[in-house]
């Protein structure tokens, strides 16, 4: 049975954030609110947790998972970022964007795209997500909480608990999230490419 934490969206209870961080460290999967949809997240270097997350989502290793980072400096540890890319990232983070970038050697091979060696990264603008990342002092790996066969993400914590209470370790409730996922922009090539239009405006990237 998954645990269920009600955490204040603006002033998260540190005791609960610490407990959530320990669940992640112990290999658990957490339903985490973000500035777009709920995400399923787990520890970056926990192979079993990442495999379980993929099974819950019904996705294979060709589907980009996303690193949720605290800030731009953390992104630069896990992705190769040139000056052009940095300017674009700085203008749009934190916010509801996921960026596809070339992965560095810090990213475990199983997490990067098997043929392209790229990784999705984002800096969420959400108080609870940021508090959890600060407590962990490390990124988490995640994916939008869309269940297999569904078109739209789950947005209410109670619905997530009903659907996944025997498959994940924790659901964080801070009120409903958006139905819109992040806007996904591929910056790994010479020109930026819009992969998915979501909550983040794409005009700043020339789309």
Image: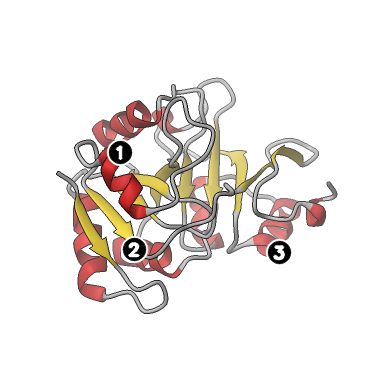
Helix, strand or loop at disc 1? helix
Mark 3: few/some/many CA within 10 Å (<14, 14-19, 20+): few
In the rendered image, residue 207, in percent from the top left (x then y), is placed at 83, 46
Please name which of the two marks, 2 or 1, marks the residue nearer to the observer: 1
* N-terminal-most mark, 2 or 1: 2
Side of 126 relative to 41 (left or right): right
Q: CA distance from mark 2 to mark 1?
A: 23 Å
Residue placed at 30% from the left, 38% from the top? Answer: 163
Residue at label 2?
132
Residue placed at 24% from the left, 51% from the top? Answer: 170
- Answer above or below: position of 176 versus 161: below
Side of 204 relative to 93 (left or right): right
Residue placed at 36% from the left, 46% from the top? Answer: 41
In the rendered image, residue 32, in percent from the top left (x then y), is placed at 37, 54
Residue at label 1?
163
Q: CA distance from mark 1 to mark 3?
A: 37 Å
Helix, strand or loop at disc 2? helix
In the rendered image, residue 10, in percent from the top left (x then y), is placed at 42, 77
Residue at label 3?
91
Looking at the picture, tell me which residue is in the foreground, 139 or 104.
139
Side of 87 relative to 143 (left or right): right
Residue placed at 37% from the left, 68% from the top? Answer: 131
Looking at the picture, tell me which residue is in the foreground, 90 or 205.
205
């Amino acid at each position: 049975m998954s645990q269920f934490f009600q955490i204040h969206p603006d002033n998260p209870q540190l005791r609960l954030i610490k407990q959530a961080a320990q669940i992640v460290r112990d290999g658990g999967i957490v339903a985490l609110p973000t500035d777009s949809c709920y995400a399923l997240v787990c520890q970056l270097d926990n192979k079993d947790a990442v495999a379980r997350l993929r099974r819950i989502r019904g996705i294979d290793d060709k589907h980009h998972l996303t690193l949720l980072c605290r800030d731009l400096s953390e992104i630069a540890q896990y992705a190769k970022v040139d000056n052009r890319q940095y300017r674009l990232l700085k203008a749009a983070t934190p916010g509801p964007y996921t960026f596809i970038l070339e992965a560095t050697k810090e990213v475990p091979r199983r997490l990067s795209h098997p043929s392209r060696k790229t990784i999705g990264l984002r800096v969420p603008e959400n108080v609870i997500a940021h508090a959890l990342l600060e407590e962990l002092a490390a990124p988490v790996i995640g994916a939008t909480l869309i269940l297999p066969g569904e078109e739209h993400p789950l947005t209410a914590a109670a619905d997530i608990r009903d659907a996944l209470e025997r498959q994940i370790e924790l659901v964080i409730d801070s009120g409903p999230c958006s139905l819109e996922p992040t806007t996904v922009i591929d910056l790994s090539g010479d020109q930026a490419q819009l992969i998915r239009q979501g909550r983040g405006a794409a005009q700043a990237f020339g789309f």
